[in-house]
Image (cartoon, helix red, strand yellow):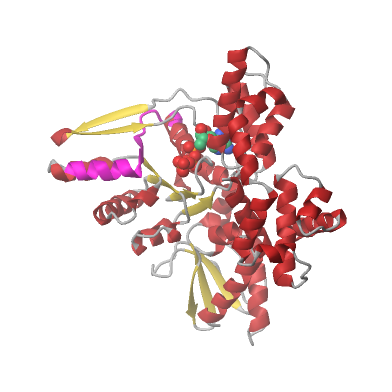
Amino acid sequence: MSVELWQQCVELLRDELPAQQFNTWIRPLQVEADGDELRVYAPNRFVLDWVNEKYLGRLLELLGERSEDVTPSVSLLIGSKRSSAPRAVQPASPALAVVQAAPAAVEEASAARTVDTQPVAPATVRTERSVQVEGGLKHTSYLNRAFTFENFVEGKSNQLARAAAWQVADNPKHGYNPLFLYGGVGLGKTHLMHAVGNHLLKKNPNAKVVYLHSERFVADMVKALQLNAINEFKRFYRSVDALLIDDIQFFAKKERSQEEFFHTFNALLEGGQQVILTSDRYPKEIEGLEERLKSRFGWGLTVAVEPPELETRVAILMKKAEQTKVELPHDAAFFIAQRIRSNVRELEGALKRVIAHSHFTNHPITIELIRESLKDLLALQDKLVSIDNIQRTVAEYYKIKIADLLSKRRSRSVARPRQVAMALSKELTNHSLPEIGDSFGGRDHTTVLHACRKIAELRETDADIREDYKNLLRTLTT
Ligand SMILES: Nc1ncnc2c1ncn2[C@@H]1O[C@H](COP(=O)(O)OP(=O)(O)OP(=O)(O)O)[C@@H](O)[C@H]1O
């Protein structure tokens, strides 16, 4: 059984899975051949368990179809192929059967899945910690006490990230180290990171939990160098119980900082201290970041935070209103959530404006009041999501002409993008089916309806369409 064959099957699986799932579970796997056997390494038990349960069967099926050996033998292990001694070895699987896990792996892996969704009571935590070190350097860690698990609304888009963060907070010894959260702006990465920090402090008020933005780490390091205090800098960062660094994409191209961070990071991992990192993209995609750092980030658990779906946006608005003791009718929350799709920060901003307007005018929150208070934002959004703009964006995305979208051509390369554009027009604008049909070269409303149904179906079954639709939605709404 060759490594190349495994890679081919991984590529085939990539076509079948949404990118987020592929990145989280399949990309971190490493593989090496050992005689006739393939040894596949997962960075931790969480990944091992998940791959074992969800994807190994399919991978073995693909391997079986492509191999002369009808019973491919694959071992799924925890560790890394460069390490000579994997931490938990599973027996080789002689057939397309479920690989048995070593008892410890089973125990921890299933514990990882048992996600405790009980809200955490608001913590009275020490939120500020200031440490003065020799040479005049002052390191301040500041945790936002409002960013707790209790205040975090769970939805499909952030479920996994929330579960992983909860595991780290409640049982840091699981070894999900580092926990790497990535995703677009304003989606709750910082919130989750602080939630872990707050929870760790709640459990142990003396814990040294240090949160900082990566730019701050760089600035501190530069200052330490200037003040000849780099040893204190090192000592400080290596003495923490948990180090939380936000937006590590800002390390890009800052070689000295990366070097320093690399050593700090290694020291912390070796000492069993928790590291949590966030970034706006998947670690391997951060340009200007050293390969060795990227590879180490993959040793722990890397999870994406996706933009929230409509239901979660509504739930977030209701929660924020409840926190500020403001009466927000459900239809009003729904209206805001439908119109503000980009990210949670924007959503919160819109709600704040509505609440301020309601206080100012002394009127209750109604859809009318929302229209009035968000007038400029909604107008801008209407412009952005006009059918014209959707057509332009879709044509650009698929590298076809707008005229093709409006034409009668039926070839797949044109017909599918046309259906995507129609479905987006239905989802993002308030135009009726006949109006949308008219805008697409005078088509009948039943054609538009068919397009919407077809795309909804393909988004379930076809990973490419799902990805295309998601990208286009993002482009059109941010
Ligand atoms: N699921 C959620 N439930 C409740 N509040 C949320 C949720 N997701 C995000 N928020 C809120 O949205 C705001 C932005 O979130 P946060 O700062 O964590 O985003 P981020 O992903 O770290 O973005 P950036 O990359 O720009 O730093 C915060 O006020 C946060 O509390």
Name of the residue lying farthest toward the top: 362
At a point 49% along the width and 53% down the height, the residue shown is 301
Instruction: Please state the horizontal and vertical placement of residue 351, each as a whole percent of the image.
Output: 59, 27
Q: Nearer the viewer, residue 48 or 17?
A: 17
Name of the residue lying farthest toward the bottom: 68
Q: Is residue 291 left or right of residue 443?
A: left
Q: In which quarter of the view is residue 411 placed? A: bottom right
Q: Quadrant of the C terminus?
A: top right
Q: Is residue 209 above or below residue 397?
A: above
Q: Is residue 464 left or right of residue 304?
A: right
Taking the magenta stretch, the answer to whether it contains residue 437 is: no
The segment highlighted magenta reads: 202-224
Q: Is residue 401 left or right of residue 269?
A: right
Q: In which quarter of the view is residue 344 placed? A: top right
At a point 73% along the width and 47% down the height, the residue shown is 427
Q: Is residue 275 above or below residue 57?
A: above
At a point 36% along the width and 64% down the height, the residue shown is 291
Q: Quadrant of the N terminus?
A: bottom right
Q: Is residue 138 above or below residue 250?
A: above
Instruction: Please state the horizontal and vertical placement of residue 14, each as a whole percent of the image.
Output: 60, 68
Taking the magenta stretch, the answer to whether it contains residue 215 is: yes
Regarding residue 153, the answer to whether it shows in the image is no
Instruction: Please state the horizontal and vertical placement of residue 45, each as a whole percent of the image.
Output: 52, 56
Q: Nearer the viewer, residue 50 or 393?
A: 393
Regarding residue 274, the answer to whether it shows in the image is yes
Instruction: Please state the horizontal and vertical placement of residue 47, each as a whole percent of the image.
Output: 54, 58
Q: In which quarter of the view is residue 59 placed? A: bottom right
